[in-house]
Image (spheres, rainbow, N blue to C red):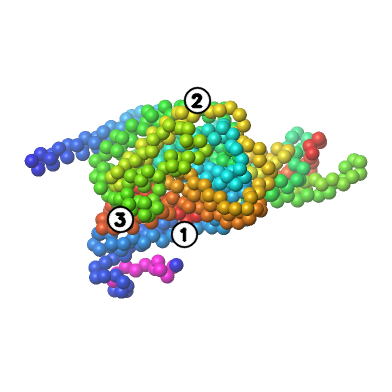
Amino acid sequence: MFIKEYIKEVYQGVSSLLKGMKKTGYYFFHPSEIITQQYPDNRHELKLPERFRGEVVMAHDDNNEHACTGCTACELACPNGTIKIITKMDLTPEGKKKKALDTFIYHLELCTMCNLCIEACPTNAIQMAQTFEHSVYDRNKLTKKLNQPNSKIREGVE
Amino acid sequence: MYAETQIISSSENNPQLKEGQLVINVGPQHPATHGVLHLVITLEGETIVKIEPHLGYIHRSIEKMSESLSYRQFIYVTSRMDYLSAHINNLGCALCVEKGMQIEVPARAQAIRIIMSELTRIASHELWIGAMAMDLGAMTPFFYTFRERETINDIMEQTCGARLTMNYMVPGGVMYDLHPEFVTRVRAFITQFKDKVTELEDLVTNNIIFRNRTEGIGILSKEDAISFGCTGPVARASGVDGDIRKRFPYTGYEQLDFEQCLHQAGDSFARYIVRIREMYQSIRIIEQLIDQIPEGDFQAKTKAVIKLPKGEFYTRVETARGELGVYIISEGGTTPYRIKYRSPGFSNLSALDHMARGSKIGDLMATMGTLDLVIPDIDR
């Protein structure tokens, strides 16, 4: 009786292993069903969805104008102090003083891509870009100035 | 703490050890502990006499940190606790803030929240099956389960903008509306899941090596599961019907038709089977909702600065690992006075010593693997 049980167990064990081997063998002979991406080689075809949160950028139009009023809503919304806004006082054509953006400092190394600054922005001045390869050799390169030199606020944005 | 964990290897330099006993350290850097968990194991030959888990290697003081963040900001940190059920952690916090503010969440947001939670649960269980099989020496199932998980991650990436730390649940609803392709992609995923999940039966469930290594190993009785405070699949595999979605329904689970997966055996294999069945139930929940997501707002209108009234608020949600409790004490200001998380991993880990005592060291991986420990969730 014991030998019968033993042989039965061995038979069942081997058949269960063969079943699994059959499954893996199937994929060995059907490479088209494998979904692995050859990542660094497919960099050019790789497209990330438009909502992907890579880093914060500020859009500028052709006249080098942005929509940031320097209201610091994003700075207050940020949980880790990633954003620092320095404002200056501009003179309007009528001769009045008006607060305007001087420098928008963005610390990529502190950012957790939580999207709270984008949600807080009342004028949609900042967006999330779809970049994701952020490694650099010098960490100072991760501190970015988002507004371009000599840029100014688009007219009509309050 | 360091003084306690110094490596003691024989009875000669440690009077507490009996003759022939041996202390070995598993972790903090060990492939089978899935993170920085340090187990100090006292052995007698190959038999486990005592297991002492040492925590604190990935403590980031999330609870203390949250005290200086506003009610909108503190939610994103919880994605970093149990990173495999980030959506459900975020949901627990959002629910607690909503309870304090007494706001009504739109029906569309509730449906989206449930679908996202269940997708997260499937992704988490898929990863666990792969990692668990790898702990027991089977490399291949890992690639098969990651294929399905990758599909879910792509869906999340398209709608929420991130793959793991989504920060999609906000007080009052969800951050954005669903992506136009979301419904089609989830339907395609359901077909793919039903088609491919049978592969796991061939590769893992019926595999003789896997069954021999998990059946009858690491038994946790119903009474012990209750007294150690175990929740989630670990408790349900011992027969404790403590599913928060059934017991204390939140965000609209009470209107859905699904079963609580129970098993009476309480061994490692029962915990595996419970998780497999739970994935089928999650698919059942998604199928009920995906064709009839209500129209309307995805976010209730809230004030720009959230202030909770003075008092204490507690909510609980069922994550992929068990019950997550969120406890907020408010003094009436813009930041919480105190936040406490009751994480499922911590209580589940406390049962490990009881479960593994008297078994062989080789069986420890099967016992510990089926607890589904996520170390950042235990340490916070």
Are callouts 3 and 1 both on one chain?
yes
Q: Quadrant of residue B40?
A: bottom left
The disc, 3 or 1, on the residue closer to the chain's N-terminal end is: 1
* Residue at the (68%, 42%) spot, across then down: B303
Decide: few, some or many residues near mark 3? Use Cα within 10 Å; few <14, some 14-19, many ≥20. Answer: many
Disc 2, SS: loop
**What is the span of residues highlighted in magenta in the rendered image?**
B2-11
Give the quadrant of residue A130.
top right
Q: Residue furthest right?
A: A95
State if disc 3 and disc 2 touch (CB < 8 Å). Answer: no
The type of residue carrying mark 2 is Asp
For label 3, the SS is helix
Residue sitting at x 48%, y 52%: B342
| For residue A77, side relative to residue B232 (left or right) | right
Residue lying at 28% horizontally and 56% vertically, measured from the top left? B361
* Front in this rendered view, residue B187 or A69: B187
Label 2 resides on the chain identified as B
Q: Relative to the observer, which residue lies in front, B178 or B165?
A: B178
Give the Cα separation between the discs numbered 1 and 2.
Answer: 45 Å
Mark 1 or mark 2, which has the lower sequence index?
1
Numbered badge on residue B291: 2
Q: Earlier in the sequence, mark 2 or mark 3?
A: 2
Residue A65: x and y in percent read 77, 38
Instruction: Kindly identify the amino acid type of the residue bearing the numbered disc 1.
Output: Tyr
Please provide percent x and percent y for residue B359. 26, 55
Residue B14 in view of the camera? yes
**Which residue in the protein does label 3 denote?**
B356
According to the picture, the residue beneath numbered tag 1 turns out to be B57
Foreground label between 2 and 3: 2
Q: What chain does badge 1 belong to?
A: B
Mark 2, residues whose alpha carbon is within 10 Å: few (<14), some, or many (≥20)? few
Left/right placement of residue A28 relative to residue A65 reads left
